[in-house]
Amino acid sequence: MRESCYRSSNKIIGPCGPCSFINLIGLKGSPKLERELQESGRMKPFYATNFTSFLVWAEKYKVGIRIFVESVGIQPGTFKMMFKFEKILKEKQKQMKKLCFNRHKNILKRNEDKIFILKVDPIQKIDELLNQGYCVAFNMAHYVGRHNFLVGHLRVVYKRERDFYFIKDSQKGIMKIPKKRIKEDLRNLKVMGSKQEIIAYK
């Protein structure tokens, strides 16, 4: 059976969280669903998403997921990024940050049994989960634009054949990527100072 891949209606990288959930569990994607997931899963009061967004979506669709993270905290630099790109006034930043922390803590508390600390190399965990029949969403980073800057991105890997991985990407669709390239993109995530978040579903 041919794999399907939902590609974002938005031409920028931003909506990769909702699109990755659609592709991870096999929903029929649409711009309307993409917007609904973005709204329900965002790190309120901000608009960014992270692994807790997948927990919110999994609750709504009553599906079981497992999450492996290097840290259960909010990613380093996340607030700085959100303040900048969402143009948050300085006088509002402290209160918005507090609200976001409270949301994060509450979601973690009711999903403790689904979250595990990642203790091995991410590519090793991805291979292990694929061998167990899971589809896997994972964080990576690559260089984009004429200024060649690093951007974080979520992709879904659903199959491995030898040293190649079959990926569902919210921008490019189905891709076949060599392991060497996957490792490079995972290293780029560390260069950014970001932590790995792996979401598994079967």
Image (tube, helix red, strand yellow):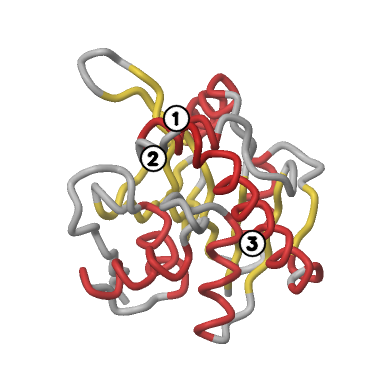
Give the mark nearer the N terminus: 2 vs 3.
3
Horizontal relation, residue 41 to residue 86: left or right? right
Q: Secondary structure at mark 1?
A: helix
Q: CA distance from mark 2 to mark 3?
A: 36 Å
Res 116 label: none
Residue type of the residue flagged with mark 3: Arg
What is the crowding at mark 3: few (fewer than 14 residues within 10 Å), some, or many (at least 20)?
A: some
Residue extending farthest top: 147
Q: Is residue 186 above or below residue 16?
A: above
Quadrant in which the C terminus appears: bottom right
Q: Secondary structure at mark 3?
A: helix
Q: Is residue 128 above or below residue 187?
A: below
Horizontal relation, residue 144 to residue 124: left or right? left
Residue type of the residue flagged with mark 2: Ile
Res 181 label: 1
Count of numbered circles in the view: 3
Q: Nearer the viewer, residue 186 or 180?
A: 186
User: Which residue is label 3 attached to?
Assistant: 103
Q: Nearer the viewer, residue 105 or 132?
A: 105
Residue extending farthest front: 91
Residue found at x 44% / y 49%? 48
What is the crowding at mark 2: few (fewer than 14 residues within 10 Å), some, or many (at least 20)?
A: some
Percent coordinates x, y for residue 134 in the rendering: 59, 67
Residue 34, image quadrant: bottom left
Percent coordinates x, y for residue 22 in the rendering: 38, 69
Q: Are marks 1 and 2 in contact (CB under 8 Å)?
A: yes
Q: Secondary structure at mark 2?
A: strand
Q: CA distance from mark 1 to mark 2?
A: 7 Å
Quadrant in which the N terminus appears: bottom left
Residue found at x 52% / y 83%? 60
User: Which residue is label 2 attached to?
Assistant: 177
Residue found at x 45% / y 35%? 83
